Amino acid sequence: MIELKTIKQRDKDTTVNSYSEDIYKYLEYMESKNISSALDISYNNLLDYLKYLDDNKYEVSSVARKIVSIKAFHKYLSENYNVVDISTKINTPRFYRKLPNILTIEEVDNLLDIKLDTPFDYRNKAMLELMYSSGLRVSELINLELSDIDLNNNYVRCFGKGSKERIVPIGEYSSKYLSIYINEYRDSMKKGYYTEKIFLNNHGKEMTRQGFFKIIKKIAKDKDINKNITPHMLRHSFATHLLNNGADLRTIQEMLGHSSISTTQIYTNVTNEILKENYDLYKRRD
């Protein structure tokens, strides 16, 4: 017999991802129903657990992942302990990823229209122009070093998820304000600290994610942009605006550093939603 306590302890000790945590919670539920052996879990017990998840308002995406974990677990039991796989009749629910929030082109123009009075203004201008023109992640932006920028050929080298390197072109305005910031203001901001990182905070040290988040939130507030703006919205806006202007999906995938084009395809849904909104608006006016 496979005792639940034994499985739970082994599973808990080797938890390295959310899937093993799913099994742990599943077995914990069965134990609460006085089921002491994994081999005694019935199809109805499994249905009861799914109902429990639904009653407790778990997200569909979370339930889908849990079902994948549970099906793998029962397949393992059937292959190794000669029991019927009770999960074969359970289908993984389909779920739809939430569409990313974006800024309109007008909102982006407003955000980037920064009054340039101080070195910090030039830094902020350079960061936002670069992020929007190249679709960088926040982590990629703040980790850029001086050797990663080629202003003569207008490209930037960044390291994405899994330290995967990619080369991304940068726009004319981005190149212009990067050059001004680096050549005229960056040295005066170092305040005795040494770092190869391009973007420095107000104390002369490396810019952090939190620091950049505060900067973009303040600029958006000052500009009366009535959206809960996040740094990632510039990346989403970059991709959506490219798609709206005729860029192909493969090019956008390469620029964003997505390993799978299915991740990039979410932006086609955003574009379709915008088209629908514009159509509905036109029909109302008509």
Image: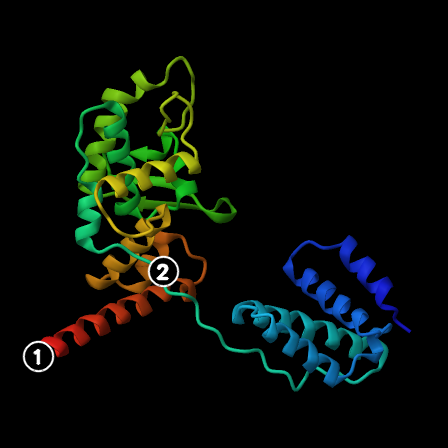
Residue toward you, 193 or 100: 100
Say above or below: 167 vs 68: above
Name the amino acid type tagged 1: Asp
Q: Going by the picture, which residue comes out furthest to the left?
A: 286
**Looking at the image, residue 188 lies above or below residue 201:** above
* Observer-nearest of 76 and 98: 98
Residue at 20% over, 50% down:
107
Dot 1: within a 10 Å radius of its alpha carbon, few (fewer than 14), some, or many (20 or more) residues?
Answer: few
Q: Is residue 41 left or right of residue 249?
A: right
Identify which residue is drawn at 36% across, 60% down: 100
Q: Of circles 2 and 1, which is in front?
A: 1
- At label 2, the amino acid type is Pro
Specify the quadrant that holds the N terminus.
bottom right
Q: Quadrant of the C terminus?
A: bottom left
Q: Position of residue 268 (x, y in %)?
A: 31, 68
Q: Disc 2 marks which residue?
A: 100
From the viewer's side, name the closer residue of 53 and 239.
53
Q: Is residue 143 visible?
A: no
List x then y, in percent, for residue 270: 30, 66
Give percent across and percent down for residue 172. Answer: 18, 41
Q: Most extreme residue toward the right, as rendered?
A: 1
Residue under label 1:
286
Q: Is residue 160 left or right of residue 231?
A: right
- Figure quadrant of residue 169: top left
Foreground: 221 or 16? Answer: 221
Which residue corresponds to the image point at 59% horizontal and 68% vertical from the top-left? 65
For the question of whether residue 174 can be seen, the reply is: yes
